[in-house]
Image: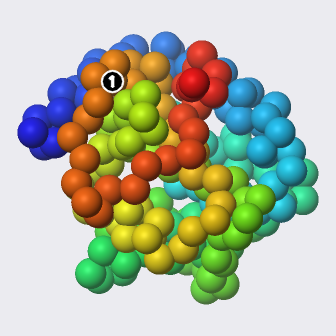
Amino acid sequence: MKKKLRKEALTKRTEMPAEERAEKSRRITEHILQSEVYQKAKSVFSFVSMGTEAETRDILKQAWKDGKIVAVPKTKQGREMVFLKIESLADVKEGRFGVMEPVTQEERIPKAGDLFLVPGALFDRNKNRIGYGGGFYDTYFEKYQGYRKVGVAFSEQISETAIPMEETDIPLDDIVTENGWEE
């Protein structure tokens, strides 16, 4: 069931015109940067967007301007993932699964007050998500807790019906779309 839902959600996102995706990404960025959670965060943990995902690069650039620490994920074997500090987008290159990963070495662990931006294929109103099928984020969330996990998505990626969850799935704290922070 999850595979089917993931495929449908990704198809819908891919079919969105590039100009519409860019405008919605701009609005998502605005909502995040204007939020209290971003303003108070000392560190921003984020994915580097790729393909048809909501764009995160402007968030990262602003975080550096604001003096925040920025960390992005690097995957390892066995559903393991670490977040490494980067100081510019020159510190990332294409890695496993075509994902932009850091070439740096300084690991960062999220803590209370940090903002943690999460990608996904589909989200529901209960803050559950269907990712891309690797289980990396849920494994990471199980290992490290206590920070604000925020899904970043277009409104088309929000399901009005609950998505099926497994025991290992960990819900997010918030979701931000072009319409703002989801209730």
Q: Left or right: where does residue 20 sit relative to residue 181?
A: left
Residue positioned 86% across, 45% down in the render = 39
Whole-percent x and y of residue 52? Answer: 39, 33
Whole-percent x and y of residue 83? Answer: 56, 73
Residue identified by numbered label 1 = 159
Residue positioned 27% across, 81% down in the render = 78
Q: Left or right: where does residue 146 sit relative to residue 30?
A: left
Q: Quadrant of the N terminus?
A: top left
Q: Left or right: where does residue 5 sit relative to residue 15?
A: left
Whole-percent x and y of residue 129? Answer: 36, 43
Where disc 1 sits, the SS reads: strand
- The image quarter containing residue 137 is bottom left
Whole-percent x and y of residue 71? Answer: 65, 66
Query: Which of 131 and 128 lies nearest the eye of the viewer?
Result: 128
Query: Which of 122 and 19 lies nearest the eye of the viewer?
Result: 122
In this view of the protein, can residue 115 be seen by the observer? Answer: yes
How many residues crowd mark 1 within 10 Å: few (<14), some (14–19), many (20+)? some
